Amino acid sequence: MLIQIETPDDIDAIHDLTSIAFEPMAYSDGTEAAIIGRLRASGDLTVSLVAEEDGEILGHVAFSPVMIDGVHAGWFGLGPMSVKPDRQRQGIGKALIARGLELLEKMGASGCALIGNPDVYRGAGFSSDGRLSYHDLDTRLVQHIVLHGPAPSGTLRFAPAFEN
Ligand SMILES: CC(C)(COP(=O)(O)OP(=O)(O)OC[C@H]1O[C@@H](n2cnc3c(N)ncnc32)[C@H](O)[C@@H]1OP(=O)(O)O)[C@@H](O)C(=O)NCCC(=O)NCCS
């Protein structure tokens, strides 16, 4: 399996994979594939990685700039992330996250934040100390990993593509 930065040829496959992976999820509102398209169109798709095997895209993860208390201080958000349903729980998601964090660190990013199931992200190094919040969501679901500098504190806001 190879993990690579997306190319224009991957765009349709990323859209289809994202739709299929999120479709059974109760928390999905069905907008995840469109969010990736809007991030790309607005220049906010900072890192977009695909996991490929034999020319097939098995997984994808997006990273985009976020604001904390209204300021972008080098923090990025992880998501949407998708793995082909019949290839989930085989380490593909973890490998995508690890490569993404490596690239963000090389770019000098301060860190990465996300909203999701702690059981999925704990092993990749994400945690919550309750100081980063997102609307009235349980802060245990608002997780982060520091790459440089201090731990984040404040209200997390994703790129406008998530709000359209
Ligand atoms: C979330 C998703 C991308 C994870 O990808 P994956 O390739 O299955 O994940 P991995 O096999 O690398 O597992 C990473 C960790 O998550 C855990 N995990 C994976 N799926 C899980 C699940 N459904 N429930 C609880 N833990 C899960 C694994 O046990 C592993 O934990 P570890 O690091 O402590 O060993 C994939 O399940 C998916 O596409 N889900 C549908 C779309 C979605 O919900 N995206 C994320 C929104 S928050």
Image (cartoon, rainbow, N blue to C red):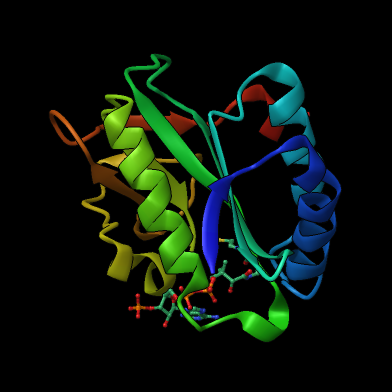
Res 138 visible: no
Say if 83 sits above or below 133 in the image: below
Q: Estimate the x, y position of residue 91 in percent, counting from the top left.
A: 45, 76
- The residue nearer to you, when weighing 25 against 88, is 88
Residue shown at 37%/38% (left/top)?
103
Horizontal side of 11 relative to 130 (left or right) equals right
Horizontal side of 66 relative to 144 (left or right) equals right
Horizontal side of 80 relative to 85 (left or right) equals left
Give the position of the C terminus as an image quadrant.
top right
Residue shown at 36%/28% (left/top)?
75
Q: Estimate the x, y position of residue 144 in percent, counting from the top left.
A: 31, 47
Q: Estimate the x, y position of residue 84 in percent, counting from the top left.
A: 70, 73
- The residue nearer to you, when weighing 87 against 127, is 87
Say if 146 sits above or below 28 in the image: above
- The residue nearer to you, when weighing 51 against 164, is 51
Q: Indicate the quadrant where residue 105 lies.
A: top left
Say if 38 sits above or below 49 in the image: above
Residue found farthest to the top: 71
Res 41 visible: yes
Horizontal side of 9 relative to 108 (left or right) equals right
